[in-house]
Image (cartoon, helix red, strand yellow):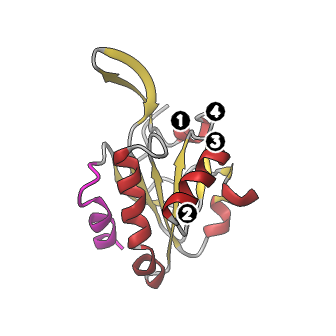
Amino acid sequence: MKDLSVGDVAPQFNLPADNGQSVNLEDYRGKSLILYFYPKDNTPGCTQESCDFNDALSDFERLDAAVIGISKCSVKKHENFKAKYGFKFPLASDQDADICERYGVWKEKNMYGKKFMGIERSTFLINPEGNIEKIWRKVKVKGHVEDVQKSL
């Protein structure tokens, strides 16, 4: 599957999220959507990134942009993670990595000489028409949310 590029139509998704909700790309038509993929709840980098997005949420909302975090963690893990840190945006569960694959973030990783499949930390800015406006791959957490803010 080819990697997504700026200008492409964002792949459709409908995923279970916390609190019995589901998130669907169509529900965000008419506003900008910040879709960030992260490896795992309650790990240092993922926690920092999610807290940074949460801290900036009111700024994003003023710019008519919504935020959704996606990982392979279960809905239950998301609910615990969200409750622990007070996140005010949905965390979606992609346990079979189908959406991760469609967005090209399900990659072979190498840690301490071990190869495994996992989520490459990535963010997609989807415009109100449903097209990809900007892509950040191999995201470094520090300063990332500020970069996203500057792009809106």
Determine which quarter of the picture holds residue 152: bottom left
List x then y, in percent, for residue 16.
Answer: 70, 50
Determine which quarter of the picture holds residue 113: top left
Dot 2 or dot 3, earlier in sequence = 3
Residue that badge 4 annotates: 96
The answer for how far apart the CA atoms under marks 2 and 3 are is 26 Å
The answer for how far apart the CA atoms under marks 4 and 1 are is 9 Å
Residue that badge 1 annotates: 101
Q: Which disc, if any, is residue 74? A: 3
Q: Name the outermost residue toward the front.
A: 84
Q: Secondary structure at mark 1?
A: helix
The residue positioned 43% from the left and 76% from the top of the image is: 60
Is 147 included in the stretch rendered in magenta? yes
Q: Residues within 10 Å of mark 1 (few under 14, many from 20)?
A: some
**Could you say which is closer to the camera, residue 55 or residue 37?**
55
What residue range appears in magenta?
A: 140-152
Q: Residues within 10 Å of mark 4 (few under 14, many from 20)?
A: few
